[in-house]
Image (tube, rainbow, N blue to C red):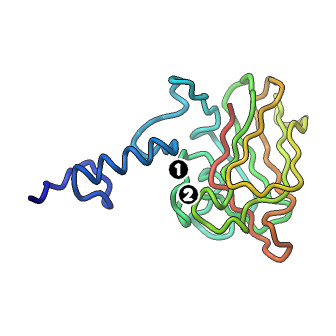
């Protein structure tokens, strides 16, 4: 017996059983594509993402559709629709948290988190914070990242602005493109 297609199910999930399987998998990896707003408040041990849907600027993009705001949209499942990409060196993203927050850390979802080859993961970068957008304090410095998702807890600091600066965009020297799927600030 064929189950009816659910109106609210993703296109890839044609049946109720497939839809439930999709939901279970996406929830297990922390996806937010089913309307879960991580900035709405922490629950079940989750951290609040202060960067989610906040104003974001960045260096020159690789192509239309890969703008800075893609790095704070809560999505990272698509190689072509949910990333910030820049060939500028150094590449940078700046997030306005809209008010001063007590920041405890960061999670960066690099190319591998979006389904791209792990050789495209950001290798070297630093994260700075500011309370006024003019004076910056570097709180994270990474020189040899290989992970698709990197997590960086810090000593709590008050900040309204966060800046990610990428100095080595990939594992190989000859690939100039920075690919950031998500920047989370908690």
Q: Which residue is mark 2?
A: 82
Q: Are marks 1 and 2 in contact (CB under 8 Å)?
A: yes
Q: Residue at left 83%, top 77%?
A: 174
Instruction: Write down the quadrant of residue 86 in the picture.
Output: bottom right
As rendered, which of 51 and 107 lies closer to the eye? 107
Image x and y of residue 10, in percent: 32, 54
Instruction: Write down the quadrant of residue 98 in the picture.
Output: top right
Asked whether, in this view, residue 133 is left or right of residue 39, the answer is right
Query: Residue furthest toward the left?
Result: 1
Q: Secondary structure at mark 2?
A: loop
Determine crowd level at label 2: few under 14, some 14-19, many 20+ residues with C-alpha closer than 10 A.
many
Image x and y of residue 136, in percent: 89, 37
As rendered, which of 1 and 175 lies closer to the eye? 1
The disc label shown at residue 75, or none: 1
Q: Residue at left 75%, top 33%?
A: 105
Give the position of the C terminus as an image quadrant: top right
**Above or below, comparing residue 6 to residue 88 in the picture:** above
Give the position of the N terminus as an image quadrant: bottom left
Asked whether, in this view, residue 16 is left or right of residue 49, the answer is left
Q: Residue at left 70%, top 37%?
A: 96
Asked whether, in this view, residue 72 is left or right of residue 126, the answer is left
């Amino acid at each position: 017996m064929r189950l009816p297609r659910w109106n609210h199910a993703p296109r890839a999930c044609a049946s109720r059983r497939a839809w439930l399987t999709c939901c279970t998998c996406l929830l297990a990896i922390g996806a937010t594509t089913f309307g879960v707003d991580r900035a709405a408040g922490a629950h079940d041990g989750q951290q609040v993402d202060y960067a989610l849907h906040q104003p974001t600027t960045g260096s020159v993009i690789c192509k239309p559709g890969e703008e800075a705001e893609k790095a704070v949209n809560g999505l990272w499942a698509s190689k072509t629709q949910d990333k910030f990409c820049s060939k500028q060196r150094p590449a940078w993203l700046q997030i306005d948290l809209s008010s001063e927050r007590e920041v405890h850390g960061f999670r960066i979802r690099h190319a591998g988190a979006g389904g791209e080859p792990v050789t495209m993961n950001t290798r070297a970068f630093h994260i700075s914070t500011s309370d006024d957008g003019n004076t910056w304090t570097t709180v994270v410095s990474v020189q040899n990242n290989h992970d698709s998702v990197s997590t960086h807890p810090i000593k709590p600091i008050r900040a309204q602005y966060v800046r990610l600066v990428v100095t080595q965009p990939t594992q190989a020297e000859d690939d100039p493109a920075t690919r950031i799927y998500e920047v989370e600030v908690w």
